[in-house]
């Protein structure tokens, strides 16, 4: 529960003046050379160098994929001697070097910069400013170097490497696949009666960000929307079937963790899935509801008993409910006693252990974690990052599906007026349908876990921002086609 993450870890246009409904794919435009490049690379003079780089090996992209696979699957947990190779660090360095070399060859700054990167830098600056006031300065510096600095580097790498819809789609598919593999391993452990905690709660088959029931449930909740959306994305039936199977395995895992925070996060996430999909792909929301109705009778009685304890203290036989409340009260007390700089990054667990009811424990609340450890100085940029992620998801959706007047809409008919399918639009639609639910699921689950420095949020942040940029580029590229069509 107090785990510290390390680095081991030619299409015909629709000839009509009326706007098309949101569920119809827009006409495809052939973007010019500069429109196919990332936001800070749109100057035509650099199109030639960008095309040259597209023909060479993209080490930034490959490094990001390899790092992510190692972070989630943690092969060193099963093959100990692999640990000495530090695969995650090695792949991250390869990706970082590839990013810098690629950007420098195009005359760009070594690292991409967006308002979100600025927020991450401010958050990191708050950690460093608070070091002199930390309960244990050395421990705070260690956590900054071993955890946050690496998170910052990987988010930058994501914003560079995830430069088009296809890559974002493949990246999220990799995360879903890795999460499913860990979930399958955990389910096998559950059937064998191993890796169980607190009287039968499912724990992760690996360590790291999937190592305990609450973190395992949180990650399944966050990445489940991408599996659900992919299951209804137009494409080959085998791929859609595989995505549906992944979603079933992930949902089963959430239930067997018996995580109360995961249960609340799952409920909030599924509601958001219905809301975001009802106007574009209603089948996704219907599938989510059917999945829940099918899972209810299959859940063990111990699951429902634990969920009832959210509201009834008498049903909590382990005392964890009261302990969580005590820790939240202590988190508020520590924040009020140190409101500006907090007690130092990672130091709530060490602070004032003699007078606390729940000594040597974390806050089990991401917001209180930041408030108690970094004070107002850290809490402001942390909340800013969450709000920026939500805004980026909203911007991406509006860029992909700009609002139209109801009077100008008309139903699509078979024949000449139906625009040809657009794979890029389908991919972006799949992503924007999943972004809001994923972020909301994290926000809810994070109120019951100390995951402010957990990799999950920062992966979601990178995916959201990269999708926003891809949707804005797509919107810019299709604008001439929409003008001609009108």
Image: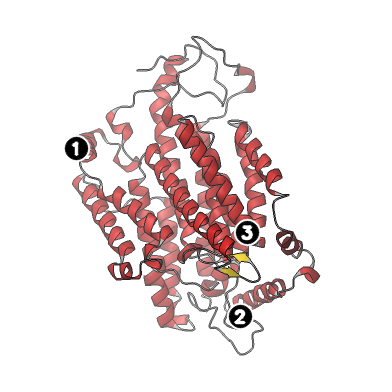
Q: In terms of secondary structure, where does tag 1 sit?
A: helix
**In terms of image quadrants, where is residue 299?**
bottom right
Residue 113 in sight here? no
59 vs 356, nearest the viewer: 59
Give the x, y percent position of residue 271.
Answer: 66, 44
* Numbered badge on residue 224: none
Q: In terms of secondary structure, where does tag 2 sit?
A: helix
Residue 265 in sight here? yes
Disc 1 to disc 2: CB gap under 8 Å? no
- Residue beneath the point at 60% across and 67% down: 365
* Numbered badge on residue 256: 3
Residue lying farthest to the top in this orientation: 416
- Quote the CA–CA distance across marks 2 and 3: 39 Å
Task: Give the number of the mark in front: 1 or 3.
Answer: 3
Q: Residues within 10 Å of mark 1 (few under 14, many from 20)?
A: few
Task: Give the number of the mark in front: 1 or 2.
Answer: 1
Q: Earlier in the sequence, mark 2 or mark 3?
A: 3
* Numbered badge on residue 337: 2
Q: Residues within 10 Å of mark 3 (few under 14, many from 20)?
A: many
15 vs 318, nearest the viewer: 318
Give the x, y percent position of residue 228.
Answer: 56, 41
Q: In terms of secondary structure, where does tag 3 sit?
A: helix
From the viewer's perspective, is residue 109 above or below residue 330? Answer: above
Split into 4 quadrants, where in the image is the N terminus?
A: bottom right
- Quote the CA–CA distance across marks 1 and 3: 50 Å
- Residue beneath the point at 42% across and 25% down: 479
Q: Earlier in the sequence, mark 1 or mark 3?
A: 1
- Quote the CA–CA distance across marks 1 and 2: 57 Å
38 vs 52, nearest the viewer: 52
* Numbered badge on residue 52: 1
């Amino acid at each position: 529960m107090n785990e510290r993450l390390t680095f081991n870890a030619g299409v015909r246009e629709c000839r009509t003046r009326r706007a098309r409904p949101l569920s119809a794919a827009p006409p495809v435009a052939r973007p010019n050379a500069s429109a196919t490049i990332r936001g800070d690379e749109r100057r035509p003079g650099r199109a030639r160098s960008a095309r040259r780089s597209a023909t060479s090996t993209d080490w930034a992209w490959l490094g990001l994929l390899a790092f992510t696979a190692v972070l989630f699957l943690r092969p060193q947990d099963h093959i100990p001697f692999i640990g000495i190779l530090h695969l995650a660090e090695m792949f991250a360095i390869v990706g970082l070097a590839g990013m810098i070399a690629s950007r420098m060859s195009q005359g760009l700054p070594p690292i991409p910069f967006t308002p979100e990167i600025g927020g991450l830098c401010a958050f990191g600056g708050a950690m460093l400013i608070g070091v002199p006031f930390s309960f244990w300065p050395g421990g705070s510096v260690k956590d900054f170097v071993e955890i946050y600095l690496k998170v910052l580097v990987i988010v930058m790498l994501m914003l560079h490497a995830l430069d088009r819809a296809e890559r974002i789609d493949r990246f999220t598919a990799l995360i879903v696949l890795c999460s499913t593999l860990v979930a399958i391993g955990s389910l096998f452990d559950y059937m064998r009666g191993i890796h169980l905690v607190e009287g039968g709660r499912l724990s992760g088959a690996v360590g790291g960000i999937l190592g305990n029931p609450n973190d395992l449930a949180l990650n399944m909740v966050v990445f489940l929307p991408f599996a659900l959306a992919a299951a209804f994305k137009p494409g080959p039936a085998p791929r859609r079937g595989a995505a549906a199977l992944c979603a079933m395995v992930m949902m089963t895992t959430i239930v067997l963790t018996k995580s109360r925070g995961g249960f609340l996060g799952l409920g909030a996430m599924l509601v958001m899935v219905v809301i975001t999909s009802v106007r574009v792909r209603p089948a996704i929301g219907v599938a989510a509801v059917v999945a829940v109705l099918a899972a209810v009778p299959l859940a063990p009685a111990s699951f429902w008993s634990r969920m009832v304890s959210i509201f009834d203290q008498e049903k909590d036989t382990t005392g964890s409910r009261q302990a969580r409340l005590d820790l939240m009260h202590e988190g508020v007390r520590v924040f009020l006693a140190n409101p500006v700089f907090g007690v130092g990054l990672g130091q709530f667990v060490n602070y004032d252990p003699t007078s606390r009811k729940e000594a040597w424990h974390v806050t089990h609340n991401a917001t209180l974690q930041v408030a108690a450890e970094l004070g107002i100085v850290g809490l402001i940029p942390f909340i800013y990052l969450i709000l920026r992620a939500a805004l980026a998801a909203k911007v991406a959706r509006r860029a992909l599906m700009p609002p139209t007047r109801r009077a100008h809409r008309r139903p699509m008919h078979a024949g000449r007026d139906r625009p040809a399918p657009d794979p890029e639009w389908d991919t972006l639609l799949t992503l924007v349908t999943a972004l809001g639910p994923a972020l909301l699921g994290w926000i809810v689950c994070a109120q019951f876990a100390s995951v402010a420095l957990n990799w999950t949020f920062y992966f979601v942040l990178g995916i959201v921002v990269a999708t926003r940029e891809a949707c804005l580029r797509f919107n810019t590229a299709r604008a001439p086609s929409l003008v001609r069509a009108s």
